[in-house]
Structure formats: C-alpha cells, structure tokens
Image: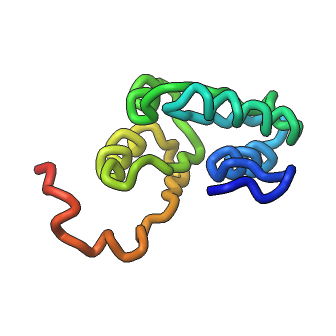
Amino acid sequence: MRKTSSNWAPPLAYSTIWWARAVGEGGRVIYTDGDRKKADEARRYFDRAGVNKQITIKTGDALELLSEEKQQFDIIFNDVDKEAYPRVFKLALPRLRKGGLFVTDNVLWNGKVTEKKLFRSEN
C-alpha cells in the first residue's frame, strides 16, 4: 500500500482509530502489531486522531498476546494471517463476553477459503 495523502493511516491503525472513537473516552482498545516500527507509526496516527488515551499498544505475536489476556472482551476484531483464523477463533471464544462480537476481517479471502488444501483439520 502506498501513501496517497497526508491523512493516510495504515489499515489496521485506521480500523483501530474507528474502534477507539466508537468505545469513547471510558472504553479501551488493544492494538497489536508484530513489528515495533509499525506499532510506533500507528501510535503517531492515534495521537493525531486524538484517541491515544483509549488505545493500549502491544507488540509481538497477536495470538500469544491474546493467549496472555485474562480479561473478557465485548468485541474482538481479528485481522491475523488468514491461515491462523481457526486458531485465533479457539483462543478468542473463551475471552469473549456472553453476547460479545467476534469480527473477522477479509473472511472470504477472495474466495480462497473454499480451497480445501489451505487448511488441515486440527482434530
């Protein structure tokens, strides 16, 4: 993706800004990124958008970070590598409050999800 204007933000940072605006000043959003440089860049966008107080930034493997969480969430927004979707679902479900939302980005993956050879059974 290339920068097209001075208001541009990376997609996940952009989504996080909207989540932070939705939860308001009393809410919390956890942003994860495997790359410290990208997380630092995202922080600058959060500051510019005025939502940095609602966002906790964690750097590392998103699935490991989720597995360390003991709290329950109202909403979990999933945007990990598509191959990890079955694993993230298993990790996320026990951490989701009753009635909570599990939202997954690009779930159809341009139709690739219909290809049996992409996923092995984890039974």
Left or right, residue 92 beside residue 90: right
Residue 19 image position (x, y, % from top left): 71, 48
Left or right, residue 96 beside residue 4: left
Q: Which of the 4 quarters of the picture holds residue 62?
A: top left
Residue at the image position 31 percent from the left and 69 percent from the top: 113
Residue 112 image position (x, y, % from top left): 33, 71
Examine the rendered structure and indicate whether residue 44 appears above or below residue 109. above
Residue 93 image position (x, y, % from top left): 40, 45
Residue at the image position 11 percent from the left and 50 percent from the top: 123
Along the line of sight, the residue nearer the viewer: 82 or 77: 82
Q: Which of the 4 quarters of the picture holds residue 82?
A: bottom left
Along the line of sight, the residue nearer the viewer: 23 or 37: 37
Q: How is the image coloured?
A: rainbow
Do we see residue 43 in this rendering? yes
Q: Which of the 4 quarters of the picture holds residue 29?
A: top right
Q: Quadrant of the N terminus?
A: bottom right
Residue at the image position 78 percent from the left and 59 percent from the top: 4
Residue at the image position 64 percent from the left and 27 percent from the top: 57
